[in-house]
Amino acid sequence: MAVSLARVSAQLAEPGERVPAELIDLINRNVDPPTTLGADDVYIRAMYVVSDQVNSFGGRFPRDEHERLASLLVDSPVMVGHRRDKLPVGRTFHATSVMRGDVQWVKSYFYWLKSAEGSENLRDNIDGGIYKECSVAFTYCLPECSVCNKDIRECEHEPLREYRHDGTIVSCWYNYRQLERVLETSLVYRGALRDTSVSRDLKSGADGADDSPETADRHLATIVNLTDLDPSADYLVVPRYDGIPILIGVRDKTVVVTRRDGSVVDHPEVARLCGEVPPGVHTGHGLLVGYRGKERCSGRQVESFLAGAESPVRRLVLTLYPETAGTALSCSDKSVQRSVRVIPYRVVCRGDLHRKALEIMTRDGVEIWPAGRSPAGTRGYHYRPSAPEVYRLEYTITQDRRPGDGVITVRHGGDVTCFEIVRLDVERLMKGGRFVARRLAGPPSETGEASPCTVASGQVSGVDAEGDGMAVLTGGKTRERFIFRPVLLGGRRQYLFYRQGAQS
């Protein structure tokens, strides 16, 4: 009998973790590690760390403090058991407010390095349910009594006891007010608050439905580098609000509000808003935004309000995009009492996008749309400026000739623009002299023995681009403008460079 030999080789395959690119971007932006991290470098998990329920000490984070707490959580360390004699095991890089059933939670996202010692043990203990509760250490100034609204250290009420108040029996707790700082979050054996958890769910909703503004149906793509946009185009920039995207329309001479799927938003409060829409408002794009006092609520909370379910929403605002509002609403009216209003906006060139975004952004950043086109059905961008960029205007003159050719480098937003100035003399420039300039593809390399030296520098407060030309407005008291005007010299496209003088 012939004998056949065979060998079957097999190996266990562990599927790679799918990490959303937006979270990696948030790590690099909010924590700013010395080395840029990628999806293959980190493990990411989330904590449902704080809710609006009363904890075992009698303390409570009211819903209107959640946004403040979420901002304080960012870039705080993650510890084990509040052991501050040990180094952190991870770091929080993002936090947001979400709903789990009828309870509002602050959900924080943290990461740790795959290359760190014990990283896989930490992952396995979290995913295996061993490390499943969490806690937060923080500082605050005012414990507000739920019965009398005074400092509970100075009133007669005690936490976790019942009192007769206004003819009814009420429980006493205290609200954490005037939050100052988050010291750390910890993995703990038992938290002071019930139902805290550590999760692999990297979406914003516990049921898998992401209610974050980034996923709202508004044809948005996340953009990190503004240089990816067309430098010759103008853009509409608006603050990023979480709400229900809607369309304004007219039926039988009556204004109606519909969702994107065409269904009418049928609610008495919405009908009242429709009655307040002034003549001259066009059909088009808008947002239905919910508020509790001055605090904006989530889109999911607005949906709960419209469905008659429990919700923190106390009033609705119909926010219209400028192409919808037309001239019927004034964008200068900043009254928070207006129920129908146009969203704050800027129309800018790419060079001014970052600076203008910083002026009107919310915690979730801004939306960017092509100017002159309706956001409805148009692809736009979601952009989160992390911090004001440093705008610098620099002239650099090489040391081998005097006066010699110079280089001016203008950094504005995400762009760097460089011009070579022929036989630049700074003193003559300041007196109104004009020079020929050539645009460079990028900053010149500093090679050779004669290194260029900086002879003048200053801040830039704005950049206006028109065609191939550019005007640079400097900051400070003088408010000068440096002009690069396209000219033809010897049949070649070059620039006339000069200082326009102080601007009032």
Image (spheres, grey):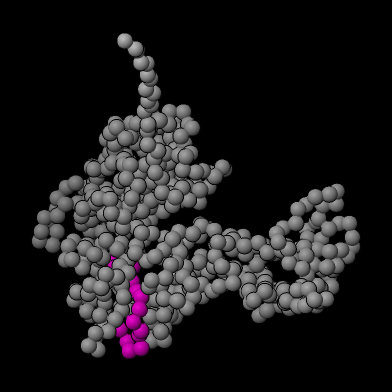
* Quarter of the picture holding the C terminus: bottom right
Identify the residue shown where x is 62% and y is 74%.
Answer: 464
Report the magenta residues as a range.
276-295
Across the whole image, how many numbered discs are drawn on residues? 0
At horizontal 51% and vertical 65% (from top left) the residue drawn is: 358
Q: Residue at x 62, y 71 (%)?
A: 462
- Residue 146 place in picture, x, y as percent: 23, 55
Side (left or right) of 409 relative to 189: right
Quarter of the picture holding the N terminus: top left
Quadrant position of residue 502: bottom right
Q: Point out residue 97 in the picture as x, y percentages from the top left corner.
A: 32, 54
Most foreground residue, 263 or 339 = 263
> Dividing the picture into quarters, in which one does residue 191 lie?
top left
Whole-percent x, y for residue 144 in the image: 29, 55
Look at the image and say whether residue 283 sits in the magenta stretch. Answer: yes
Q: Is residue 323 above or below residue 381?
A: below
Q: Is residue 138 visible?
A: no
Examine the rendering and report whether any part of residue 428 can be seen.
yes
Picture quadrant where residue 388 is located? bottom right
